[in-house]
Amino acid sequence: MSDPLVLYSVNTLLAYRINEQFYQQIHFVWCNPYFSATSPRAIDVQMPPSSTPYDICRKYLEDIARGDRHSSSFRDNRAGLETGMRLKLAEGVITEEQFQELDDIVAKASLDEFRPLLYIIPFEGVRELAQLPRPSQRAHPFSPEYRIERLSRSRFDVLDWLWR
């Protein structure tokens, strides 16, 4: 597979704000070189919905529109944020007081805070940061996924999904 031109990643507004305000504008992202399974170049790859930016955004937007407070997407996002908070506390990035503040923010987040944001990441700017996860970590062993553990805000653009 040749290098992609861009990588796409989806995160919630809540996660974005936490990374911006508490983690020095450093983001952790899973990425895909295709926005959708219907992308012309995606014809020969496996694209499960859980790793396809279009499908991830659509799921969040549907759950918000329906007011689904028990959404697995929201539950998984909260769990990921809590894991990240514990790691950042252990690394000394945040204090115990900030951890407690974040815990409250995540627990009380409104449905609108789970609005999806699409990150557009030029590959040339992250080539040295982008890691190919092991096949067992991907949504499908042949799914074209990347992981970036320390993505600086200066290396990507954000598109906000206007769902109203």
Image: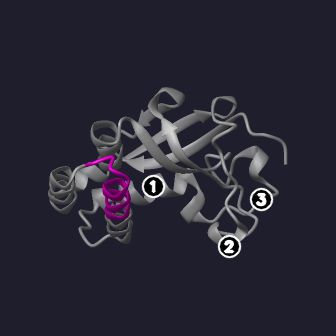
- Is disc 3 in contact with disc 2, using a CB cutoff of under 8 Å? no
Q: For mark 2, does the 10 Å Cα neighbourhood hold few (<14), some (14 to 19), or many (20 or more) residues?
A: few
Q: What amino acid is found at the position of numbered circle 3 in the picture?
A: Val
* Residue 151 left/right relative to 97: right
Callout 1 amino acid = Arg
Displayed quadrant of residue 7: top right
Distance of label 2 from label 1 (alpha carbons) = 25 Å
What is the quadrant of residue 75 in the picture?
bottom left
Task: Pinpoint residue 97: horizontal percent, then vertical percent.
Answer: 15, 52
Question: Looking at this rendering, what residue extends furthest in the right direction?
Answer: 1
Q: CA distance from mark 3 to mark 1?
A: 20 Å
* Figure quadrant of residue 80: bottom left
Between disc 3 and disc 2, the foreground one is: 2
Secondary structure under tag 3 reads: loop
Look at 45% across and 55% down and name the residue there.
58
At label 3, counting other C-alpha atoms closer than 10 Å, the crowd grade (few under 14, some 14-19, many 20 or more) is few
Residue 58, numbered circle: 1
The C terminus - image quarter: top left
Q: Where is mark 3, residue-wise?
A: 45
Magenta segment, which residues?
Answer: 82-94
Residue 112 position in % (x across, y down): 24, 50
Relative to 8, residue 62 above or below: below
Task: Looking at the image, tell me whether mark 3 or mark 1 is earlier in sequence order.
Answer: 3
Q: Secondary structure at mark 1?
A: helix
The numbered mark at residue 136 is 2
